[in-house]
Image (spheres, rainbow, N blue to C red):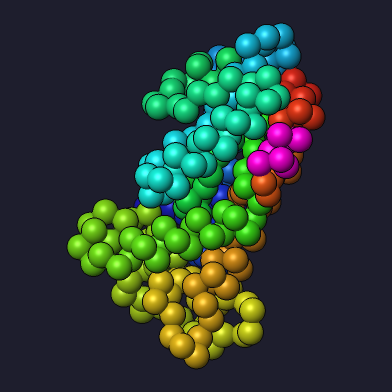
Amino acid sequence: SARRRVVAMDPLTVDLLRAAFGRAPEEVPYGARYVRTLLSGVRCGQRSRNESKLLLVSKPWAVLPRHESVAVLEMVEVAASKTGWTVNAFDNLEYRELAVFGVGVMFPWDWSLVTFVEWYRAGLPVILPDAQWVQSIISTVLWYESQDHDSWRYVWQARFVSLLPLPWGGRDELAIEHPGNFSGRPWIDAKPRADGPSLFDQVEWWYGRTDFHRMPFVKTFVSLVDLQMVLLTVQPDVVCS
C-alpha cells in the first residue's frame, strides 16, 4: 500500500506533534495561492483606490462576555471614526467580499484561526492586540470554558484539543519539564497545580509558536491611542502587494 504522510498547516502544530511523537511532520502552509484563487485575485489596486476605507473587525462577542465584547467593539469604532475608517463587524463573508476592505482588526481567542490566515493571505493588513493582550484572552477563554465539564467536553475541548489531548498516554520521558520551556508536554493544564507553572505562563510559551506571533507584517496595538496611530499610518495597498 502507498505510504501516507502526515502534514501540518501551521508551525504550532509542527511543534506540538514533535513534542508528542518525537518527530515533526512536513509543514504545508495554508498558502496565498489557494486564497487568491478563491478570491479571483487579491486586487491590491482596489484597496488603494477604496475611498470608503472599510475596516473589517472580527466579532468579539463570539467568545468574550457580552459587556466586554461591546466595550472592545466600541473602542475599535472610536479609533476608526477618528482616523476616517468605517467599521464593519463581519458575519459569514464570502471570499470575494474581502477585497472591498482596506484593513482588518482581530481579537484571537484560540491558538490557530483559519479566518486569520485567510485575511493575511488575502493581502488584508491584519491588526491584533499585542501579545500579552491576546495571551490573556486565550487564557481566559480556556480557563472559563474548562470549568463547565459538559460544555467543555462536548463543545470546547475540540477547540483546544491540540494542546489538551485527554487522556494523554504519550512519551513519559517528556513529562519532565525544564523551567520556562514547555516543548516536551503538548498540553496545557487549565487547572494547574500550586507548585506548577501558571496557566498564563503555559499560554505565553505556546503563543510564541502561533501564526499570530510568527507572521511578518502583522501590526499590533496596546491601547486605543495606539490603535489610532496604526490606523493613521497603515498603507493597505503596500501591505497587500
Residue at (58, 43) in percent of width and height: 29
Residue 50 appears in the picture as rendered: yes
Name the foreground residue: 28 vs 90. 90
The one of 137 and 118 positioned closer to us in this rendering: 137
- From the viewer's perspective, is residue 96 above or below residue 175? above
Residue at 28% x, 61% y is: 152
Residue 144 belongs to the span the image colors magenta? no
19 or 122: which is nearer to us? 122
Percent position of residue 144, x then y: 36, 63
> Residue 75 sits in which quadrant?
top right
Image x and y of residue 21, in percent: 48, 71
**Which secondary structure class fits the magenta region best?**
helix
Q: Residue furthest left?
A: 150
171 vs 233: above or below = below
The region drawn magenta spans 224-230
Who is closer to the viewer here, 22 or 161?
161
Q: Residue at x 43, y 75 (%)?
A: 189
Which percent across, then down, holds residue 111? 50, 54
* Magenta-colored stretch includes residue 226: yes
